[in-house]
Image: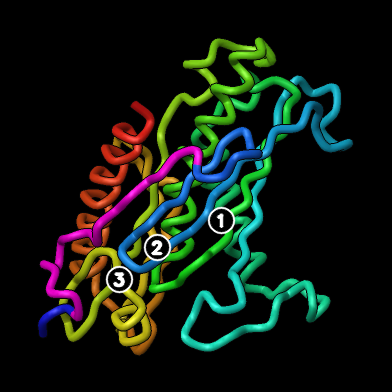
Amino acid sequence: MARPDGRRPDQLRPVTLSRGWSTHPEGSVLVEFGGTRVLCTASVTEGVPRWRKGSGLGWVTAEYAMLPRATNTRSDRESVRGKVGGRTHEISRLIGRSLRAAIDLKALGENSVVLDCDVLQADGGTRTAAITGAYVALHDAVTWLAARKALAGRPEKVMHRSVAAVSVGVIAGEARLDLCYEEDVAAEVDMNVVCTGTGEFVEVQGTGESGVFARDQLDALLDLAVAGCAELAEAQRKALS
């Protein structure tokens, strides 16, 4: 079965990382995976949460949100509902965990960076696009701290590895990379994979949406994801250069 946008099974959507998209944050990136667009900003504050004071370690955390009309129909703002949804909490924590894998918190020193990832337009893979873009925003925020001699360690030690993420899935029995929304809702198996720039895994989230999957399918999906993350890491390097 052909993909909705005519891509090969192992082909990413067009990926764009636009740095400095927002004026005020210490780091900002508009990341685009095809029709999915996420604004990632990195905000630096001196000091760390109370529970971390005196440790000599910095802190990186993330918040994720979706604009009301990022999707086909309008969703209420969670601030109006008065409650942050479970999905939002889960994705925020995933982004934070993923980006902490990229940074040496001791070399960061007692500084905090908050990564805000706001989905402007959703067409599948919003969390993976957010992680990929947030890495670049975080890198720029660390560069900002380095320019002010506010780091505890050498700048190159702080960001000691890159991190990117991509979705994979099985649709009509075929393993595919970087699912758009139309594929995501039809997937028999759905997986989000976070990798370092050298191919190690940070996190793997996978489920059989409409059944179970075999070991060879899992291996095929992981192979696709690792190759996709390698392409994304190269896109990050080019954006940062």
Q: Which residues are magenta?
A: 4-20
Q: Which structural element holds mark 1?
A: helix
Q: Are marks 1 and 2 in contact (CB under 8 Å)?
A: yes
Name the magenta segment's main secondary structure.
loop
Above or below for 129 versus 187 = above
What residue lies at 61% left-to-right and 77% top-to-bottom?
A: 68
Q: Quadrant for the C terminus, please.
A: top left
Q: Residues within 10 Å of mark 3 (few under 14, many from 20)?
A: many
Q: Which structural element holds mark 3?
A: loop
Residue kind at label 3, given as amino acid type? Leu
Residue beneath label 3, please? 179
Q: Position of residue 64 (x, y in %)?
A: 61, 60
Q: Position of residue 19 (x, y in %)?
A: 45, 39
What residue lies at 50% left-to-right and 31% top-to-bottom?
A: 139
Q: Quadrant for the N terminus, please.
A: bottom left
Residue beneath label 1, please? 94
Q: Position of residue 26 (x, y in %)?
A: 62, 33
* Tag of residue 192: 2
